[in-house]
Image: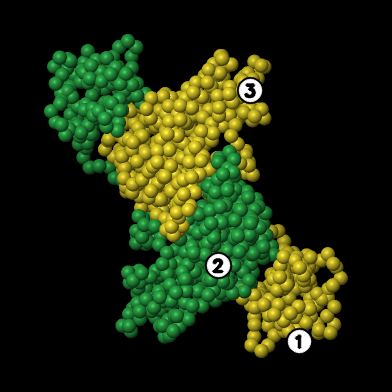
Chain colours: A yellow, B green
Amino acid sequence: MSLLLVDNRGPDLAPWKVPARRVSMVPASSATHTFLRLRRGGPATLAAQLVEQLRRAVLEGVLQPERPLPSSRELARQLGVSRNTAVAAYEALAADGTIVMRPRRAPVVAHVPARGGPGGGRAQAAPPPPPRASKSARRLAAVVPADKLDALLGSRARSRPFGVGLPDLELLPWRILERCVARRFRSMSPADALYDDPRGALLLRRAVLHHAAVARGVRATVDQVFITEGSQAALDLCCRALLDPGDAAWVEDPGPLALRAAVHMAGARLVPIPVDEDGLRVQAGARRAPRAKVAFVSPASAFPTGARLTLPRRIELMAWAGKAGSVVVEVDYEGELRFDGTPLPSLLALDMEGVKDRVIHVGTFSRSLFPGLRLGFMIVPPAMVRAVAQMRAASTRSPPYLLQAAVADFIDEGHFARHLRKLKQATRRRRDVLLGELAGLLPDMGWVRAPAGGAVLTLELPAGVDDVALVQALAARGVDALALSRSTAARRGPSAPGLILGFGAHSEAALREAARTLAGAVREAVGGGG
Amino acid sequence: MSLLLVDNRGPDLAPWKVPARRVSMVPASSATHTFLRLRRGGPATLAAQLVEQLRRAVLEGVLQPERPLPSSRELARQLGVSRNTAVAAYEALAADGTIVMRPRRAPVVAHVPARGGPGGGRAQAAPPPPPRASKSARRLAAVVPADKLDALLGSRARSRPFGVGLPDLELLPWRILERCVARRFRSMSPADALYDDPRGALLLRRAVLHHAAVARGVRATVDQVFITEGSQAALDLCCRALLDPGDAAWVEDPGPLALRAAVHMAGARLVPIPVDEDGLRVQAGARRAPRAKVAFVSPASAFPTGARLTLPRRIELMAWAGKAGSVVVEVDYEGELRFDGTPLPSLLALDMEGVKDRVIHVGTFSRSLFPGLRLGFMIVPPAMVRAVAQMRAASTRSPPYLLQAAVADFIDEGHFARHLRKLKQATRRRRDVLLGELAGLLPDMGWVRAPAGGAVLTLELPAGVDDVALVQALAARGVDALALSRSTAARRGPSAPGLILGFGAHSEAALREAARTLAGAVREAVGGGG
């Protein structure tokens, strides 16, 4: 019977630092060395340590393929452990095929493929290249600025003026939301804990549809409603369900970077269409990409200018889509937040041939409640329901039921409508405060577009200002903003510099103070030197 | 000044049923018809009704482009509403560009593009075809059986024996979980409510990594860990990040349908590789698709046979991946649930050149906690972190912080490890009960594979049995099962019929009763007639 070599010399010789060399089997009597070092009283049981170390020895070629091992009795004796420990270790090793048990004989090491001699293959020449990312991933890497990703990795979002796309967390009725979550958790049934319809929880789909019908004139059935993990997830689904590589897609220019990222991931050709004060210039789009497969448009409030799509443009858009066989994706980031006048109707309120079949409405609870909920929704044409549901079933399925049910209760009990009213009033006041401050502080420095809805305004700056550097300088002073030049699609000549300022998430006092900081930095950047 | 035609004849004439015809402007004195019908005391304000109906009139061509409207004073008088109501309505219509306001003059209807004469374009010939789904969506539709999707739509998952992939909801410590959620909600900070690192919450990534290191020998850093919306979302991400259309991907055959769906969505070429009692037959894979970009494999427990990948096979697999420049995705659906012996180590525990750079480990909380949580995780090679993070940022971002934080607490406080122990004991007892029942009831009817882990076993049936029909017959008798023939990749000749039975989610009594029902149906299907 063969035994293991024993090496008790190095007290610091951790098992995972065993030198990878061949060890021959010697009779028990001469066993003075071992690569096995068992620690009593540590977190791992003796059997687990034995399994781990023997497996490593096989793997590293320290124990040779098809050579016999000591019997469990012999192993136990050698190591001073109980027979049960040795048996348990051998059984575990047999279970994963490291060793082969034989009736009434000692086990043998399994046939393990050669891995390039001593050192377990470590001595190979150049390591093989790392795996190559898909075209989709590489397209995305090419379009998303590296510093954007750096800012996301390893850090959580912060809420400072004038951060964009942030909700006001102070105004949210947290206690009510908490009660909705707790109540739903307590009353959770088995069905609530299992898999749901890939479109999401029926009760939230109903609540969303009812709200959209009342507030925005949406006409659809609950079958068409999907709950998603936010609006970006919905946009990504639209791209995946509709766009093939090379297909053209209209996007508003300027427009949000995240939407462009989703279009790039799908490999589609991004066609930036200018936006004027009447919204997307449909006729320009029809000239540039008459057969675009999808048009992404924010009729209630284009980002970042706040322009709404006028009724004539809406009709032009749908007439074009009908002729071109295209789909219009209505991206409604802040459509709920129209504070001047009544909310604008959704494209799905337009009573026109084909609207029902060609419009996807995308919304989110990230602005009206909070982003950490990860809830948004989309309403898709009846003919697309099955395709999108299949994609959901093959990817994220539906969001967590608990949160969907809690938000449905929050809507159904009237808290949501009440919260929106408060939010709109506060947002309008904040817009007025910020406009007043900017007019006073920067009377001749730029051009402010004041929106009638949404919580973002743009400050256009004189040509030549480096708005990306200005944003960095502002960040160092505790004020956030986005560079306008980054919101325009690349490769269209030098774009106007400017700042995109979110004003929905902070108190009037905080906005006033941040406006003073902003004005100082802007004056320096424009060259007035303060 | 022009006025609107007034038509007060039809009391049932709902505003949205106005006949679409042109109405000319006539002097106020002869106004006897109107298409405007305002209802007092209804849910919508008079102004909102006015906006809705005037907008529709413009849209349908009832009001002509660029023609003047009555002044707000005149409109108010005509309709018997307050001046404020009329002004509010006009302002809302001007806001969306339906009409154009003029200083000191009556507003005009905006220039609205012609839509094909009276009827607002409704009289067009054939409606344009519905939008065409992407290749990705069509590939998916071609591979997912329609009845699978039908079963998902409009219904929530049910938990009956022998449903597959279901957790035991009775054993879960609900009160503790509820407390974890409630505590995190109460102590939520602004950062918890905003956007997070696209890899997910740091505290859950840490907890997952620690657990995986202790239980499965995973060696990785927290930078490599992503929290996803379940394991399917992680698999979809793997496909999107690595596979281009036409790339080959190994999948285990038989294997789970959902994984195949994700591979098809990416347009990759699915290469089914047979599984024997030592797991994936790596050499068969290397012959069939030597340069496959990705190999999907479940080393701890192949679905549905329960076979584990032996150490020699693991080494073969990684040696192949290194040579081919491929990535191995370790799909660990039920790796936690190894109840015979100790859990098998992850591929990421293998101390072999290139493992760290070529293995993606995918896990889920759907089996160990519950699917409605929508939480899973993946550990990716360092070189892939940025690409995957970018994809996350452009799609679903990260799961809801609240649930991630609650699960992290559940793990860190030791509840998870305790729950897993209970779960494994119960699962082993249930396996033994079901094996005993099947052996007694169907002594000569099939071949049962008894797993050492996981909560699924397969019952192979004599050739010629229609297992899909058998599954339907069972469902009608209150027993769920999956058809084994559906878990094998299509177009590989007739596959062995059989049933896939999940036994982890129900009590021993429920399993005994279901086994009797099952045995009756199987005997009928095999032809014994009971």
Measure how far apart labels 3 and 2 are at the Cα level. Answer: 58 Å
Q: Nearer the viewer, residue B241 or B172?
A: B172
Element assignment for label 3? helix
Numbered disc 1: what chain? A
Mark 2: which amino acid?
Answer: Leu
Residue at horizontal 58%, vertical 65%? B420
Look at mark 2 in the image and give the residue it sits on. Answer: B423
How crowded pointer 2 is (Cα within 10 Å; few <14, some 14-19, many 20+) is rated as many
The quadrant the C terminus of chain A occupies is top right
Q: Nearer the viewer, residue A255 or B510?
A: B510
Mark 1: which amino acid?
Answer: Met
Residue A369 position, x and y percent, is: 48, 38
Element assignment for label 2? helix
Look at mark 1 in the image and give the residue it sits on. Answer: A1
Answer whether labels 1 and 2 touch (C-beta < 8 Å): no
Do dots 1 and 3 share one subunit? yes
Q: Nearer the viewer, residue A177 or A62?
A: A177
Q: Quadrant of residue A103?
A: bottom right
Look at mark 3 in the image and give the residue it sits on. Answer: A517
Residue B406 falls left or right of residue B473? right
Answer whether labels 3 and 2 touch (C-beta < 8 Å): no
Residue at horizontal 22%, vertical 20%? B79
- Residue A6 visible in the shown view: yes
The quadrant the N terminus of chain A occupies is bottom right
